[in-house]
Image: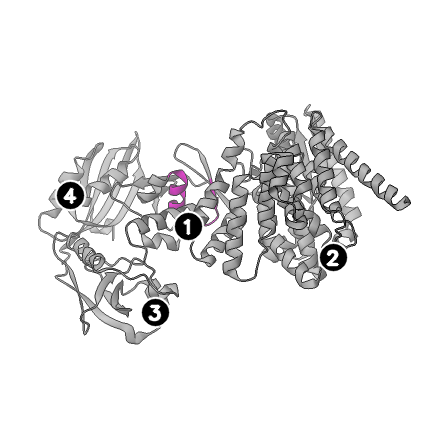
Amino acid sequence: MAEVVSETAKHSRYLTELLAQVRKYSPSADENLLAAAYSFSKAAHEGQFRLSGEPFFSHCVEVARILAELELDTVTIAAGLLHDVVEDTGCEIGAVEERFGHEVAMLVAGVTKISMLGFKTDEEHAAENLRKMLVAMAEDIRVILIKLADRMHNMRTLQYLPPEKIERISRDTLEIYAPLAHRLGIAKVRWELEDLAFRYLKPREYKELASRIARKRRERENSAQDACTHIKTFLKGAEIDAEVMGRPKHLYSVYHKMVEQGRDFDQIFDLLAVRVLTKNLADCYAAMGIIHSHWKPLPGKVKDYIAMPKANMYQSLHTIVVRDTGETLEIQIRTLDMHRTAEEGIAAHWRYKQGPRKVDEQLDQKLLWFRQMIEWLQDAKDPKEFMESLKIDLFANEVYVFTPKGHVRVLPRGSTPVDFAYAIHTEIGDHCLGARVNGKMVPLRYNLQQGDRVEILTSKTQVPHRDWLEFVKTPKARYRIRHSLRARGELEEVEEGAGRPAEPVPPARAERRREVRRGVHGREHRIRIEGQKGLQVHFAKCCDPMPGEQVVGYVTRGRVSVHRADCPHFLQACRDEARIVPAQWEGETRIIETAGIRITAIDRPNLLSDILQSFVPLTVNISQARAYKARNHRGMIDLVFELTEEGQLDKVIATVNQVSGVTGISRLKPTEYR
């Protein structure tokens, strides 16, 4: 009898503590809803125990506590208390909806779907499970917040599971859940998940690193406390009101930096950072200036994430300084609101509100990347492609680039002008003809760098090319390119490189390609394949061979693929030399002259694009294009092209002169472009 009373008193205390926790940030919270969800879940899980011997219901309480620590609304916390009742007790979702309403039931159903997936090692199953999880999240992002809280408490008690389950769950945590927490901006959840997974996946490294950090803890704490005291003095002298505190780096971030940078523990200087929290935005920049006036910043180590926030909403000023003692110190400066967002990310937007929850337009905008990611990843048919695209979106470091008007776009590191074009608008991506970066023409394969200013040149006749898929980084660009290629019936795989059967090309496709070749220079161009009859001929999209270029044929299932002889994809992918056959253009175009012109014009948007567009009806192949800024709002453009007919140069000059803004054209000497 005493045990029953004791257990009842303990659960009464649990509920009292949970309600008190919620009351701190939401005095008008619906405590009746939480009390009812608490009682319902406790009764449903009666008699169930975890492997640790604890009542199963204790897990539900801990999940609710984690959600309350994130200061989420009572609907989400109630769903956290109930998140396992459908999966583990046989309770129907209809009963949850009848008792607690549609919103709570929807969240419980979403978490149940994710819990029932169970990641498998087989790549196809893993990819499909991830798709389902992302779709469940898309319905309401609070689903993944509950799942993250669920995963966090499970990781805290993971030691009671068999070794193989410990490893699988820890790996899923490190590869999927921690990156999701990071992408949603919930730093404190990410850090704990990473450290717990690190502890189980690399126990020896974890213990060794923890021991080395512990040995230097007192020394580092004293150093940080001294730095905080100095910073407070600096800021007080400038009448800046701020909170200053030390922040230890979590273990996995230190280990990851050691592995990624190949550095020893003793070479990691920023084991403890100092955080400065100010009252307003102006004080952030003022505080940085004051600190830099006393301690010298390291070159290249000052980062402004306030002007250019990270994709997960993170905002802060970062600097690494050298103190007068010779020590280096990382300092982060942000406002209190920025700090809350940095710690809790998306979760910070779910404050409890009495009555129906209002539409948060700012939140919707910040979740746009996520909903787009769902759409783009749904198009990935190959499990490997799906997993790779997901990891790029979750793990990639970011590069900040600017539009011509100074607007910032955040892209994965390694992105190209094509990725940038699609990030601006689908139409711009589809019609991307070229790009100027920092005023200079660059290849579409160019990897964008921090701070690049990018201008996209477009043409109405331009369409996405198959070879763009070889270098684009973002899921959106890949999705839109594949969509366009499918619509044009041009998505067949390059069979010698794809590692899977190619889609057959109908006869009309091959014939249409020949017609395209007829229009290149106003003459008919056919391919002659020696020793082969009755086979379809198609031109490989990886290199798109043109008349005048040396070509080679590759015999595949019932057809011949024609590549440029120097096509890197072909040279790398072909395995069977017996299938290589000679190929030659019939009626090849003879280049009679290479010419160059310099165009002077009044500089304006889309000038280069319009000039290049004027060449389309001339059937002239441009081999070089360079653009320059001149004085007095003037621009110069050098073009080098191949002439195949008498009198063609005069036609070029006459046509270009008609372009708006062009004020003069002169011939270039061969020494100026060779």
Q: In percent of the image, x 57 and y 59: which residue is there?
A: 120
Any mark on residue 652, and which? 4
Q: Position of residue 456 (x, y in %)?
A: 34, 40
Q: In percent of the image, x 67 and y 55: which residue is there?
A: 198
- Counting residues from the start of the chain, the first of labels 2 and 4 encountered is 2
Q: CA distance from mark 2 to mark 4?
A: 76 Å
Residue range of the region highlighted in magenta in the rendering: 410-425
Q: Position of residue 248 (x, y in %)?
A: 71, 44
Say if the magenta span includes residue 539. no
Q: Nearer the viewer, residue 72 or 271?
A: 72
Left/right placement of residue 183 relative to residue 44 reads: left
Per the image, the residue denoted by label 3 is 574
Per the image, the residue denoted by label 1 is 379
- Counting residues from the start of the chain, the first of labels 1 and 3 encountered is 1
Q: CA distance from mark 3 to mark 4?
A: 41 Å
Name the image colouring. one colour
Name the residue furthest top: 239
| Circle 4: residue type | Val
The quarter of the displayed image where residue 346 is located = top right
